Image: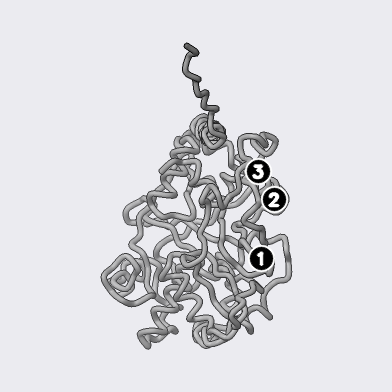
Amino acid sequence: MDPEPVTVTSRPLHNEREVVRSAGREAISTFLDSHNCFSVLRSSGKVVVFDTRIPIQLAFYALVEHDMQAAPLWDPALCQFVGLLTVTDFVDILLHYRANGLDVATLATRSIAEIVNDPALLASSPSSSSSSSSGLKRQFFHSADTSTSLKQACLMLHKNSMDFLPIMFPEDMRVLATITYTNILEHLVTHFREQRRLFDDTIYDLDIGTYHDRLVTVSPSQKLADALNLLHEHNLSALPIVTDDDERKIIGVYSRSDITFLATASDAEDAIANLDLTIEQIMAQQRKDMTTPDALQTCSKSHSLQSIFEYFAQLRFNRLFIVDEKDCVVGVVSAKDLVVYFLDV
């Protein structure tokens, strides 16, 4: 009697792919654990720190003058850092004043401390129960020191919904710099851009980014105030600008860090008036410098994670918009998305 045939099952290809994916994530996770914050600091740079007693409007224009996105806040009465002021905070303040019919001229004299502790501004923040889409988040000062691992720094940024993390010198608690997801991604790409096999899957298959119905867009005919409210409401850093027709082709990007409408204003009242400009008018004023991290950059769903690493090494982007063959936007992947993927949170 012949023996029964034995069925030999080959290892499914998707299992091998999962092994490679896990190896890639583990390699980067180990790298983030073994490198500290000092490793991503530039050899030279500048840090702006604000005394909380100075007027909020003066602080904002100082950020613009020094081309800085954020600055730590020092409270001389407490002798400690109490928060971080960003360019977008001032935008949120203007939106609040506009929505509530307040006198923006007072921003020339109201101190940072008065503004960041204003109950009305805090009550209308997105984390409150208010339906208003303007306001400030309550200030807390989260920081890391130079010996903190990059993994811990990433987790601090992620868990506290932060865009900037101050790095302190532990001996005297000086602020050396503020780092972002983009800084950390740059460090990763420098070390891993050659390891192709570990990152061969597409960003779409890996579910890195935001796609389809979850994507928030703006059209050229919408007002700047509408776009800023959308950014604030959805806690986004940028919006793709798409055509008004059904095709929704991407034609630009509006970033919260784009403060042209503020920098060109003669005073706070002029800045409020600029909120009624359309996105099309704002696009006409935008810098045409394609090297800025917030410039419009695109890729397709078929791009591998490795090719995105290569792209980042060349362009140092903050985000890539994902388009189909007709240039219709279908998703977005940011530096934050790419870093958080490796945190396994």
Judge whether residue 117 can be spotted in this image.
Answer: yes
Q: Which residue is mark 3?
A: 306
**Amino acid at circle 1:** Leu
What is the quadrant of residue 233 in the picture? bottom left
Is 153 or 117 nearer to us in this picture? 153
Image point 52% across, 27% down: which residue? Answer: 9
Give how far across and how far down residue 32 sits, in percent. 52, 35
Image point 56% across, 56% down: which residue? Answer: 333
Mark 2: secondary structure: helix
Q: In 3D space, how far apart are the residues under numbered discs 1 and 3 (Cα atoms)?
A: 20 Å
Mark 3: secondary structure: helix
Q: Which residue is mark 1?
A: 296
Q: Which residue is mark 2?
A: 311
- Coloring scheme used: one colour
Is 170 or 178 nearer to us in this picture? 178
Give how far across and how far down residue 14 sits, in percent. 54, 37
Is 184 or 30 nearer to us in this picture? 30
Give how far across and how far down residue 268 sits, in percent. 50, 82
**Amino acid at circle 2:** Tyr
